């Protein structure tokens, strides 16, 4: 889920961060509970045992929060993509209908700044082609692997299949635009 969340961090690095958060929350919980329980003047043995148990609980809570954060980010990103997708498909359909190249369709979407939920994903497609030299269908497939939105993944794979087969992108996007707006 770290890849689909768009956090821009390696999975191994995030695993290290999770362990660090767990360790820090455990230590912080221990000393915080120790201070609080000493202030209440409870028996020292009970204070120490309570602080140890509380610190374990604090560590578990820290781990759970750190573990669930990428999923939360991916879910938010997916909602943003899903919100902008119907209108972006209509825009893509109109651009494809004008006879523009498929890559220029993505460039126009990116420069329009009308679809902030899709900007990061479309920027990846354009960068794969312009910076890394991939062909468009490979770029679309690579982005479809890491996108958190199932509908956007289907769209990218459909465009890639249409481009590879030499089919009509205009027809594909027109039918998809009609279906999308009906669903919307």
Image (cartoon, helix red, strand yellow):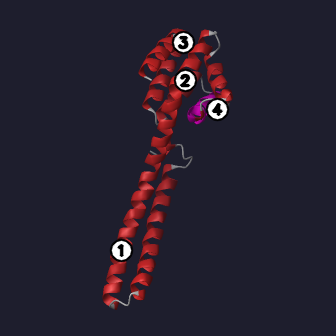
Dots 2, 1 in contact, CB < 8 A: no
Q: Kindly report the distance in space between the C-alpha atoms of the residues bearing marks 2 and 1.
A: 50 Å
Magenta region includes residue 121: yes
The answer to whether one can see residue 154 in this image is yes
Q: Is residue 20 left or right of residue 43?
A: right
Quadrant into which the N terminus falls: top left
Question: Which residue is drawn at the image coordinates 46% and 59% (left, top)?
Answer: 18
Among numbered discs 3 and 2, the one appearing first in the sequence: 2
Where does the image place residue 22, in percent across and percent down from the top left? Answer: 44, 65
Mark 4 residue element:
helix
Q: Kindly report the distance in space between the C-alpha atoms of the residues bearing marks 3 and 2.
A: 17 Å
Where does the image place residue 147, in percent across and percent down from the top left? Answer: 49, 35
Q: Which residue is mark 3?
A: 169
Residue 147 drawn above or below residue 56: above
On residue 15, the disc is none
Residue 30 drawn above or below residue 142: below
Q: Kindly report the distance in space between the C-alpha atoms of the residues bearing marks 4 and 2.
A: 23 Å
Q: Which residue is mark 2?
A: 87
Q: Quadrant of residue 47?
A: bottom left
Among numbered discs 4 and 1, the one appearing first in the sequence: 1
């Amino acid at each position: 889920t770290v890849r689909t969340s768009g956090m821009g961090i390696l999975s191994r690095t995030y695993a290290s961060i999770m362990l660090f958060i767990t360790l820090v929350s455990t230590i912080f919980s221990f000393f915080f509970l120790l201070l609080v329980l000493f202030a209440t003047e409870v028996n020292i043995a009970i204070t120490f045992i309570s602080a140890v148990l509380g610190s374990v609980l604090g560590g578990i809570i820290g781990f759970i929060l750190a573990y669930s954060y990428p999923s939360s980010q991916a879910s938010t990103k997916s909602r943003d993509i899903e919100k902008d997708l119907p209108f972006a498909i209509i825009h893509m359909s109109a651009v494809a209908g004008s006879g523009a190249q498929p890559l220029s369709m993505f460039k126009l979407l990116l420069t329009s700044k009308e679809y902030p939920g899709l900007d990061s994903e479309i920027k990846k497609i354009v960068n794969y082609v312009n910076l890394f030299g991939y062909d468009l269908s490979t770029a679309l497939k690579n982005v479809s692997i890491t996108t958190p939105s199932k509908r956007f993944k289907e769209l990218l794979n459909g465009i890639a299949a249409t481009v590879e087969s030499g089919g009509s992108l205009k027809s594909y996007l027109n039918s998809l635009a009609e279906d999308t707006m009906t669903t919307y």
